[in-house]
Amino acid sequence: MFSGTDDLEEALSLVCVTALGLNRKVNSRMSLAECAQRLGSDEGVRALHLLADRVGVDRARFPDGPALRQLFADEAVSMKALRLHRGRNVYGGGKVALWKAVWEPLRAALSPAGEVLELARRLVAMDTTTMGRDLSACVAFLTQQLRSAAFDVDRVEVAGANPILIARRGARGLAGRIILYSHYDVAASPAADWRSPPRELIERDGRLHGLGAGDNKVALAARLHFLSSVEHTPELLWIIQGDEETGSAAAQRIMPDLLRGLTATLWLEENGYHDHDGTQRILARVIGSGSTMNLPPDRHLWRLIEHLGASGAAFGVKHRVESRGLNKDFFAAGCPFNRNLPIGARYLAIGVNDPATGIHQPNESVPSWTLPLHARQLGDILTWTDETAREDV
Amino acid sequence: MDEVTLDQEEAFRRDGFVAIGPLLGADELRQLRAAHEELLVRWAADCDVTVEEYTRVVSQWTGLWREHRAFATHLHHPVLARIARRLLKADRLRLFHDHLISKPPRHSSTIPWHQDYPYWPVDRPRALSCWLALDDATADAGALVFMPGAQQEGEQPPVDFLRSNKDWGERIHASRAVPVTAGTCVFHSCLSWHMSPPNATDRPRRALIVIYMDADNRWDPDHSGWHPMNAHVTVPRGERFNDDQFPLIALADPEVRS
């Protein structure tokens, strides 16, 4: 009998990069020996405890320095015994002990919630490419999910196009209004070029692979789960269209009227990116007019950026700010959401993708570690919206 | 006198396991334990640690027959081999591998419910383990526990030993601990569901396991993930295993009850 422990190195690598703020691309998969060197040092143990504080885990759940070093030393003996004379460690020590001592206390904080994965799995499983056979089923699924989260859902039907869902939910204890934008359609990608079935959400090498994972079904699932489970929210308006990958014909027609006269504390874009090293790319701007469409963040947005940056720091990542919209100009008419934002609107794009996501490409994927950070930052947005709306008044 | 009774054969078929014995005498057991202790000294030195440090961590070894003559001789123990052949209903037996599992006092834990076969690069579940107790394996010392009859439900996906959460529900009450004295063998199907609790006593609990398979089984590396025996295979996939590393078992009596 031989146990499956392939993911221990991946888990400990994630702990290392998060605790020590390392470059996520360079250190995405470290050997156990490297993890031992980094986490077993005095600096590593201190960083582990500080990480626990930042993500709300009791640091008493971790072994002290000597005990942690002993666990790594035991595992080193295990690996040597296996290599030299096929000796194995099957009880308590070695990999199992490291898993329990280091990863299990942090697992819930550093890995995606099971409910998000399940939602994403169901969304990816549906064929929502142009003329896809599951477009109607996806609309029904999202409608049901939104209604069960107490949203009022209107389906805007436009001839020759997929329905646009307009979901509204009144304030739940917080001031302000957030307008969110998403889409449920995906661009096709030849199945033959994929390493795994494109409509199966597969977790591999710390990433979630699946057609539309990065554009934008995983972010959609993350937000759906977050807004379904959080207790206090401001007023929410969520526009979810189904033709973004083919030029958004219907949305281009209805969005001007839909958005005209609307005000919101924040307009939240469908998704956003991290750099290869993990640095978060925060797109934040105030909508101007004419040639000054992208105005820099105002003082309120800067305060939000500080909150988002603090959450990023808890996960060991830096951030940088760009005053522009998410680049989605695949069609001449552009994104109907971006094009119709009112003057003075505060716009934010953050999300779960990175440069390896490869939207519209085979093996599209999302780094798993971004999901718990995204959930935390959605919480930051709610709190900030409440504070800002009260100040605006 | 038959080495295995019809009742025992029927119990193996029905439950997936049967304990028979003692089949080994005190001298044979003493030789095997001494051989293991001799190897421990060598292995600890290999790892630059003391035997105490080594045995606190390492507790299972595969391929002992290549390391010590006592274990090589044990593979062909005539009584054990004949019983294995009867229970497996095979014309010829081949070794898949042997291994020794130690549950040392204070340094063991639960091995969760699992089947063995899903981890093996073997094309069909025509194999059984002969689990020989080198020490008394009492219930509190980590005796094997089986779910009788579960082998008849076929192969299930391999259990992840780090996250195993096999839930039998009410059926758990049907599970059966099989405490045995030193020298007794528990023969169990490769599809049997079994687990073992920690050794809560101050005594060692060592077991020497020989996995006998039908000699006509084929190498199928796609059936499982990584397995240490793959490194010893020299035949193409789909072929019978090579005799040098997976030796045929000498059998004194070729008759097979069918």
Image: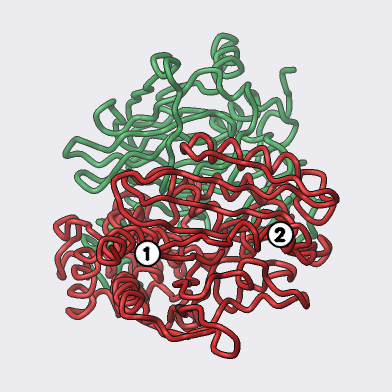
Q: Can you identify the residue that label 1 sits on?
A: A377
Q: Secondary structure at mark 2?
A: helix
Q: Is residue B242 above or below residue A69?
A: above
Identify which amino acid the numbered label 1 is placed on. Gln
- Say whether marks 2 and 1 touch (CB < 8 Å): no
Distance from disc 2 to disc 1, alpha carbons, whole Å, reads 28 Å
Foreground tag (2 vs 1) = 2
Q: Is residue A55 above or below residue B74?
A: below
Chain letter for red?
A
Q: Can you identify the residue that label 2 sits on?
A: A251
For disc 1, the chain is A
Q: Position of residue A3 (x, y in %)?
A: 48, 50
Identity of the residue drawn at 49% across and 65% down: A268
Identity of the residue drawn at 78% across and 78% down: A332
Identity of the residue drawn at 40% across and 58% down: A375
The tint chain B carries is green
Identity of the residue drawn at 83% across and 64% down: A190
Is B114 or A283 nearer to us in this picture?
Answer: A283
Q: Which of the two discs, 2 and 1, labels the residue nearer the N terminus?
A: 2
Q: Secondary structure at mark 1?
A: helix
Q: Is residue B178 above or below residue B212?
A: above
Q: Position of residue B63 (x, y in %)?
A: 51, 55
Q: Quadrant of residue A305?
A: bottom left
Label 2 neighbour load within 10 Å: few <14, some 14-19, many 20+:
many
Q: Position of residue A50 (x, y in %)?
A: 19, 70
